[in-house]
C-alpha cells in the first residue's frame, strides 16, 4: 500500500514539474506584458505546490511555513506588477 | 521502491493511504491540465482560466492530501494547512481581477492610440460602441 502512495506522490511531483515548465515557457513566449505576469503568478503557485509535495515526501512539517511565505510573496508581487501595468507606477 | 519511502510513510494505515494517493493523483492531473491551458489557449482572456483552475482546485486537493497524511503520521488532527487554503482562496480572485483590468486597460489604450487619440483621452471608451 505504501508503494501506491509513493507512486502517487512521484506522479504528482512529475505533473507539478511539467506545470512549472509550461509556466516558464509561457513566461518566455508571452506576447504581452500581462501574459508574462499571469505566467509568473502561476509559476509562484506551482512552486508552492511543489514545496507542499516535498513536505509530504520527506514527512516534515517545516515545508509548510515555506509554502505559506511563497503564497504570500506571490500575491504581493502579482498585485504590484498588475498595478504597475494599469498606472505606470506602484505607489501613488 | 523502498528507498523512496520515509519511515513514517511506511506505517500509514491503508485507509488513509488510499485517499491520500487518489487526491495526489487528482491534484497532479488538474495542475497539469491548468498549466497546459496556460500554454496552449490562443488569447489572454482565455489563458487566464487555466491558472485559475489549478490555483483553486489543484491547491485544494494537495492541501487536503497533506492534512490527511500528517494527521495519519502524527496521530493527531493537523489542520494548519487550512491557513494556506483560506489565503489562496481569498487572494486568487483579487489577482485575476487586477490582471484582467490591466489587460482591458492596455487593449483599450492601444486601440485608441491606433485611432489617433492624444495621450489625455487615451483611457476614454470610444463613443461608437
Image: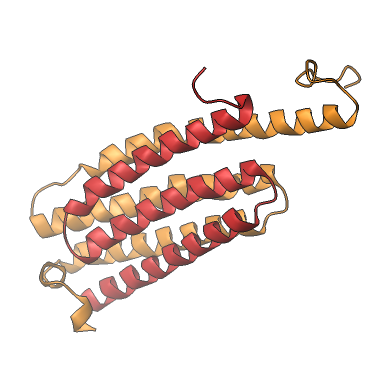
Q: Quadrant of the N terminus of chain A?
A: bottom left
Residue under the point 9% across and 49% down:
B76
Rendering coords of residue B68 (x, y %)? 22, 54
Q: Residue furthest left?
A: B75
Figure chain in red? A
Q: Residue at x 29, y 42 (%)?
A: A69
Colouring used for the render: by chain
Above-or-below relation of A25 to A86? below
Question: From this viewpoint, is residue B87 visible?
Answer: yes
Say which of B77 and B54 sits in front: B54
- Where is A64 relative to B118, above or below? below
Measuring 24% from the left and 66% from the top, which residue is drawn there?
A57
Location of residue A39 with respect to B88 vertically, above or below = below
Left or right, residue B66 beside residue B113: left
Q: Nearer the viewer, residue A54 or B5?
A: A54
* Quarter of the rendering containing residue B126: top right
Q: How many marks?
A: 0
Quadrant location of residue B83? top left
The answer to whether any part of residue A1 appears in the image is no
Above or below B92: residue B18: below
Measured as percent of width and height from the top left, residue A13 is found at 37, 67
- Residue under the image location 77 percent in, 28 percent down: B109
Where in the figure is residue B70, as x and y percent of width and height? 17, 55
According to the rendering, which colour does chain B have?
orange
Q: Nearer the viewer, residue B35 or B19?
A: B35
- Pinpoint residue B62: horizontal percent, then vertical percent: 34, 54
A72 to the left or right of B123: left
Amino acid at each position: 500500500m505504501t508503494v501506491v502512495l509513493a507512486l502517487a506522490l512521484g506522479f504528482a511531483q512529475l505533473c507539478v514539474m511539467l506545470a512549472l515548465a509550461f509556466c516558464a515557457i509561457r513566461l518566455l513566449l508571452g506576447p504581452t506584458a500581462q501574459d508574462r505576469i499571469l505566467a509568473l503568478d502561476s509559476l509562484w503557485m506551482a512552486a508552492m505546490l511543489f514545496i507542499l509535495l516535498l513536505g509530504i515526501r520527506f514527512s516534515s512539517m517545516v515545508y509548510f511555513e515555506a509554502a505559506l511565505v511563497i503564497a504570500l510573496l506571490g500575491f504581493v508581487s502579482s498585485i504590484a506588477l498588475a498595478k504597475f501595468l494599469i498606472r505606470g507606477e506602484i505607489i501613488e | 521502491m523502498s528507498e523512496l519511502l520515509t519511515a513514517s510513510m511506511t506505517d500509514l494505515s491503508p485507509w488513509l493511504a488510499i485517499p491520500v494517493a487518489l487526491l495526489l493523483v487528482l491534484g497532479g492531473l488538474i495542475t497539469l491540465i491548468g498549466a497546459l491551458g496556460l500554454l496552449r489557449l490562443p488569447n489572454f482572456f482565455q489563458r487566464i482560466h487555466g491558472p485559475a483552475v489549478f490555483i483553486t482546485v489543484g491547491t485544494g486537493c494537495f492541501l487536503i492530501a497533506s492534512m490527511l497524511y500528517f494527521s495519519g503520521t502524527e496521530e493527531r488532527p493537523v489542520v494548519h494547512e487550512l491557513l494556506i487554503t483560506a489565503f489562496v482562496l481569498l487572494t486568487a480572485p483579487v489577482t485575476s481581477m487586477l490582471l484582467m483590468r490591466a489587460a482591458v486597460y492596455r487593449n483599450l489604450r492601444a486601440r485608441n492610440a491606433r485611432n489617433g487619440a492624444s495621450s489625455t483621452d487615451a483611457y476614454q471608451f470610444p463613443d461608437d460602441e
